[in-house]
Amino acid sequence: MIIATRESRLALWQAEHVRTLLQQLYPSCQVDLLGMTTRGDQILDRPLAKVGGKGLFVKELETALLEGVADIAVHSMKDVPMQMEAAFTLVAIGPREVSEDAFISNKYASLDELPPGAVVGTSSLRRESQLHARFPYLAVSPLRGNLDTRLRKLDEGQFDAIILAAAGLKRLGLGARIRAVLTAEESLPAPGQGALGIEALMNRPEIAAWMAPLHDARTAACVLAERAMARALGGSCDVPLGAYAKMRDDVIWLRGFVATPDGTRMTHAELSGAMAHPEALGQQLADTLRGAGAEAILASLDA
């Protein structure tokens, strides 16, 4: 079994994690990693929204699957495009670490402590729009690179604070760098944030069967609801939106928002629905958001 993975430290951790699980499940199976550099890793001087979006992080890995040099690819679910090509499928979504964003700073303990003009680094329009909406007096500056690069730029004094996904920091043993975990009310996460996905070719059902024990149905239901909402709204790096689902008993509680990048126009909505129909719930929430003002916001983004 060969796992295609990006070569960043976090991506390699994720692939190693899946390899360990597979070796425990199938002791007689040899599992190897195929490290790859993607276009998303190479282009670091421009925001993702300007150069092709998060699909730049998965294209080379998908090519490895098509060419038969890898059997599966491991992704952060927030990096998987909402519209997948027909040749590929997600054969497993693993248990979530944490979904929330994290506030990291060497000088301040929270967003509320940042003075006017303080520079916050983020590469995400989703985070940027929410920051502008809550703290219009802060400066938001683009921040690209892998997790270690982003922390280094903070430590060099290029930013007063940065916002990252808490899951990645925790997975790499860097939880001590987190000054505050931002609640969903403070920063609604990206669809799929904190969850790992395993991708394979649609025409290889034996792979799906082997990966089945790694699939977490409750996490998957939440992630599928989030992704369905985003997909229905044209979710990409060009659209500032968030989607966050939690499971209570067998009911999914899904909330979402759509905004302009400057945060001056934003619409929120929340719905609940059965775990058995997550994508229908995501579509329903998208429809609710459109009726509440998202349609006009999306039209302004295309203008």
Image (cartoon, rainbow, N blue to C red):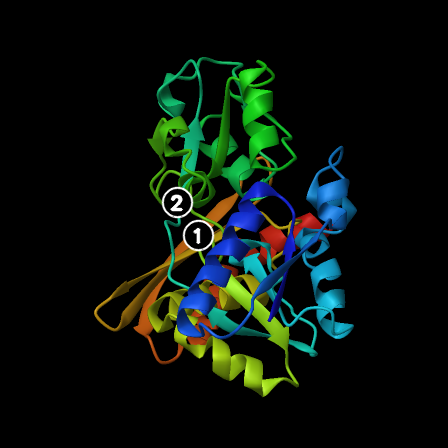
Residue 211 falls left or right of residue 180:
right
- Snapshot quadrant of residue 234: bottom right
In the image, which is nearer the foreground, mark 1 or mark 2? 1
Asked whether the viewer can see residue 264, the reply is no
Give the x, y percent position of residue 143: 63, 31
Q: Are marks 1 and 2 in contact (CB under 8 Å)?
A: yes
Q: Earlier in the sequence, mark 1 or mark 2?
A: 2
Q: Residue furthest left?
A: 249
Q: Percent from the top left, x then y, of residue 112? A: 36, 22
State the residue position of label 2. Answer: 100
Work out whether 209 lies above or below 168.
Answer: below
Which quadrant of the figure has residue 1?
A: bottom right
For the image, the number of numbered tags is 2
Q: Which residue is mark 1?
A: 194
- Name the residue nearer the viewer: 278 or 104: 104
Up/down of 178 relative to 108, above or below: below
Q: CA distance from mark 1 to mark 2?
A: 8 Å
Foreground residue, 59 or 262? 59
